[in-house]
Image: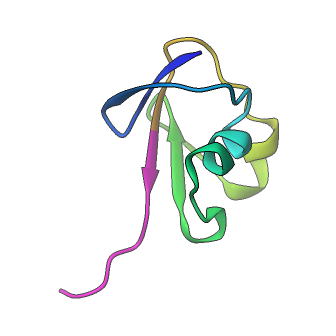
Amino acid sequence: MNLTVNGEDQTVSAKTLDALLAELGFEPEFLATALNSDFVPAEERADCVLNEGDKIEILSPRQGG
């Protein structure tokens, strides 16, 4: 399936947002996620089904100021 992840085109096999994070090697407990500009809480990622062409944003906290 083709998705846009953080502005970059990706071809992945994941069917859910939770599976996508695992496939891309993210540590899910320290992230914020959005699907097509809608925030997806961590507890809903496993049920968040991905579709061809979806746009995913994965945000991680930064240090410093």
Does residue 19 sit above or below 1 in this rendering?
below
Q: Is residue 26 left or right of residue 41?
A: left
Q: Residue furthest bottom?
A: 64
Q: Is residue 46 left or right of residue 2?
A: right
Percent coordinates x, y for residue 45 in the rendering: 72, 45
Does residue 7 sit above or below 45 in this rendering?
above
Q: Quadrant of residue 52?
A: top right
Percent coordinates x, y for residue 57 in the rendering: 43, 42
Q: Residue at x 23, y 88 (%)?
A: 64
Percent coordinates x, y for residue 8 in the rendering: 32, 31
Magenta residues, start to end: 57-65
Q: Is residue 39 left or right of residue 23?
A: left
Rendered-image quadrant of the N terminus: top right
Percent coordinates x, y for residue 28 in the rendering: 64, 62
Query: Magenta segment: does it hold 47?
Result: no
Q: Residue at x 43, y 65 (%)?
A: 60
Does residue 5 sit above or below 63 in this rendering?
above
Q: Residue at x 67, y 50 (%)?
A: 22
Please tell me how many numbered marks the rendered image carries.
0
Does residue 63 sit above or below 38 in this rendering?
below
Q: Residue furthest left?
A: 65
- Name the one closer to the observer, 38 or 12: 12
Rendered-image quadrant of the C terminus: bottom left
Q: Residue at x 73, y 41 (%)?
A: 19
Q: Quadrant of residue 16?
A: top right
Specify the principal SS of the magenta part. Answer: loop
Report the colour scheme.
Answer: rainbow
- Name the one closer to the observer, 6 or 44: 6
Q: Residue furthest top?
A: 52
